[in-house]
Amino acid sequence: MPLTTLPYAQEMNMIHRVFRREAAQLRAAVAATPGGDAVRAGVVAGVIREYVGGLEHHHATEDAMIWPLLHARAGAREDLVERMEEQHHVLDATLAVVLAHAGRWAHGARAEDREALVEAFDEHVAVLAEHLDDEEKLVMPIVEEHLTPDEWEAVGRRGLENVPRSQVFIALGAILEDATPQERAYFLAKVPAPGRLLWHLIGRRQYRRWTRRLRGA
């Protein structure tokens, strides 16, 4: 029988795995695209835009629903909350640079634009790794202490409510891909029964098709 709850940090780690994995794979996909292959560059640039949108939405949810509660309740750790907010600003800046270079690279797939985008990804991945590590090790214990289960559930609902309907199974597949069997069972148990049925009938295939855009067969 699946667990009815997981530690907050374990749930957050499931989401963070997605961003770590996708950032690394996007960087590799850019580097591997031959100069002049505008079709492939356009495909990868499209996935980059989806990745940026997903990470921005994830951080907007934290900005709106987690940090204000910690400011109000965890005054002794105010420095760590401010650190998270500042890291979000730095990450936003790296994402803006990635998007700008991706847009230029998508038009013509010039080798020099590709190399500039790879460098932008290197900077982004370094900043992302530092932020996710800090959040998991330093801040999630404070979240566990100061947010109620209902408040934490509300964070999760907000994280999903703005996902376009056409992308719901993509988001679910991305979360489940590297999950442990226990985590998979827990997360799927949170999905309404019709959604679980649709995931097994069509969602998994949709996710496999989506991953082939970036990874190939």
Image (spheres, grey):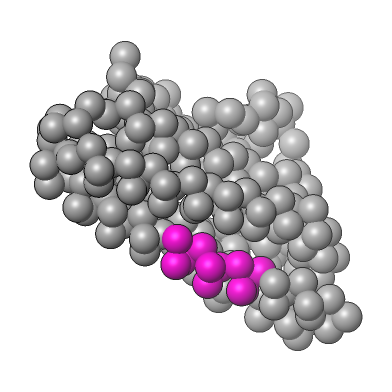
Q: Residue furthest top?
A: 217
Q: Quadrant of residue 67?
A: bottom right
Q: Which residues are magenta?
A: 84-94
Q: Position of residue 36 (x, y in %)?
A: 13, 32
Left or right: 156 with respect to 149?
left
Left or right: 142 with respect to 196?
right
Which residue corresponds to the image point at 49% horizontal and 46% vertical from the top-left? Answer: 122
Which residue corresponds to the image point at 12% horizontal and 47% vertical from the top-left? Answer: 107
Q: Position of residue 100 (x, y in %)?
A: 28, 59
Characterize the magenta stretch by its predominant secondary structure.
helix
Q: Residue furthest right?
A: 76
Which one is nearer the viewer's eye here, 52 or 32?
A: 32
Which residue corresponds to the image point at 34% horizontal and 47% vertical from the top-left? Answer: 117
Q: Position of residue 30 (x, y in %)?
A: 33, 35
| Residue 174 on the magenta segment | no
Q: Quadrant of the N terminus?
A: top right
Left or right: 105 with respect to 53?
left
Q: Position of residue 121 (x, y in %)?
A: 44, 47
| Residue 89 on the magenta segment | yes
Q: Quadrant of residue 110?
A: top left
Q: Residue furthest front?
A: 112
Using the image, determine if residue 168 lies above or below residue 174: below
Q: Is residue 210 visible?
A: yes
Using the image, determine if residue 170 lies above or below residue 95: above
